[in-house]
Image (cartoon, rainbow, N blue to C red):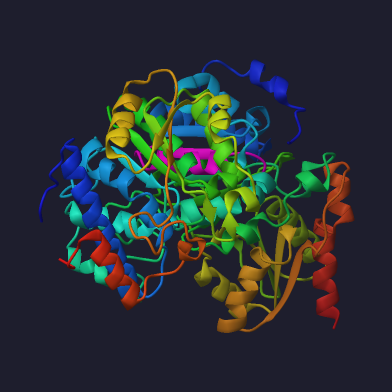
Amino acid sequence: MATVTQSRDIEFLKKQARTVRIEILKMLAQAGSGHTGGSLSAADIVTALYFYKMRHRPDNPKWPERDRFILSKGHAAPLLYTVLALTGYFDKSLLNTLRKTGSPLQGHPSSKMLHGVEVSTGSLGQGLSIANGMALGLRLDKSPARVYCLLGDGEIQEGQVWEAAMTAGHYVLDNLCAIVDLNSLQIDGRCEDVMKIDPVAEKWKAFNWHIFEIDGHNMEEIVTALDEAEKIKGKPSAILAKTVKGKGVSIFEGKVEYHGLAPTKEELEIALKELGGNGK
Amino acid sequence: MGSREEKSAVNTQQSTVESQSFAGQAVATRDAYGAALAELGKRNEKVVVLDADLSGSTKTAKFAKAFPDRFFNMGISEQDMIGTAGGLSLTGKIPFASTFAIFETGRAWEQIRQTICYSSLNVKLVATHSGITVGEDGASHQALEDVALMRVLPQMVVIVPSDGFETKQVIDTVADYEGPVYVRLGRAKVPAVMPADYKFRIGKAYKFNIGRDVNIIANGIMVSAALQARELLSKEGIDAGVINMSTVKPLDTEILLEAAKISKLIVTAEEHSIIGGLGSAVSEFLSENHPISIKRIGTRDTFGGSGKPDELLKLYGLTAEDIVKTVTEFMRK
């Protein structure tokens, strides 16, 4: 199994993100169901984590000093599976089994079934509490490891997120970085119409977090924020990343219906053309 | 949320952690927990404790005082407490998360399902203030459904200790067991029932004796009531056995079959709803494997209420006399 090549080179990361998107779309089309929009909106961020920022060892998923990644928005499982496969946690051919009976690639991530998944998620609102617990445990052990937690913007409607936000501020978890994928859409429509979440930045600030507001598709801004967040002491960091749901493929971009729809064969062909991928 | 009546206890804790077995001592199971936990903390550095602003009442305050770095008060946020406990377990810690039983299992049920059980995390949920013996605080604070809520979850072990001596052993045992466990404790002082040579094991019931006429399967405070009922029944010429089924899941089916095969009637007794708890677990097993007449003692599809614990036990039919009445009525038929 390959070990991961990591770099801060922006062109390298952009290329990886393109490959990640291609693999996500292929696996979703093969599965026939799954969450396209939210996997694509967070693709650049998660690529930057796995191909640059996080210290991790795909050949030793339980390495104690690894940085942890919690996918609180568990429906973006195709994105997590793709970066795990591409960084060498398991063979890429496994991606074809997404959502199939008996596959370790469950519809939402299961840590008991797949190496590299830190904890099972899928029920929204629970990941940040888990990340807090990890950050507390790592601090007790004086570990240098950091914890990253990716949340959706619809997800922050869950009350538990704010319980956890309060906890991270109270316990001064500066080894924790939350990233909110602000793609503005949720299953039933625009967050603004379903349940207003704004002002988002002020909320996290009010809970004693240091915040970064970035363009979640600008790789330079992503890696800079991840680097800067590591230097913040005395507060947990939140990167509020403005994104586009379905980013990278024009027919999916900003379309609420692709929250939970997989691409058809025809849509996949269009998408691959746009992404410049020939399916390799 | 929650009663603050015992908050002052935080400041009156002993500063030293002593070893206590509680054998033969009448003590509230929560007090035995507080002492056992602090002692465990001394022996095992991996043990960490979380509470949701009720540490004075759950008695985790004793651990908090002895090991402040390993105690996390989560404030009044049970759902976050469960997730945080899960995260701590993923870094190799052994978290004990405590609050009142209804808030622990009810408020945070889905967090327990999704985060703890589905990922099979090594978290110990030890809840106090179960049942109606919570007393004056009333129905909002009296969990009569918690065993049902926990028993239905895959991976979960469910334990209802009968006295302080057993509680101490349960706490030591579950710390060494890998996986999610729910331990149900009470607020009120309870009599000592377990013999000094008793050794708790997960999934192993304790047989006081097997009766030829009836066997009473009890746990928690109802073991004491069952033992009293046995004496009263013997005066009426009825040979009753008593079994302490402290582990509700996994159930000790071997002992159940032994008891069922020898007697005419099985009675279950628990300080919990007859729906979903020990009575249901026993009925489910015996109806499939050795059908026999079963009577369940417990609260009957109702909420609790305010009052003195002893008066409430009478009001809700959870006394030795209620067991005796149930048995003698059956025998007369």
Q: Is residue B238 magenta?
A: no
x and y percentages locating residue A141 in the rendered image: 32, 27
Asked which quadrant contains residue B316, the reply is bottom right
Residue B170 is at least partly visible in this image: no
Left or right of residue A94: residue B17: right
Instruction: Identify the residue shown where x is 82% and y is 70%.
Output: B326
Is the residue A226 above or below the residue B65 in the image?
A: below
Instruction: Identify the residue shown where x is 50% and y is 65%.
Output: A257
Relative to the observer, which residue lies in front, B171 or B226?
Answer: B171
Query: Which image quadrant: the C terminus of chain A?
Result: bottom left
Is the residue A186 above or below the residue B20 in the image?
A: below
Q: Is residue B82 magenta?
A: yes
Residue B242 is at least partly visible in this image: yes
x and y percentages locating residue B281 in the rendered image: 61, 69
Asked which quadrant contains residue A178, the reply is top left
Query: Which image quadrant: the N terminus of chain A?
Result: bottom left
Relative to the observer, which residue lies in front, A260 or B189?
Answer: A260
Instruction: Identify the residue shown where x is 45% and y is 64%.
Output: A258
x and y percentages locating residue B15 in the rendered image: 55, 15
**Which segment did they paint magenta?**
B79-100
Which residue is the extreme one toward the left? A2
Left or right of residue B143: residue A169: left
x and y percentages locating residue B78 in the rendered image: 61, 41
Is the residue B86 above or below the residue B281 in the image?
A: above
Left or right of residue A273: residue A196: right
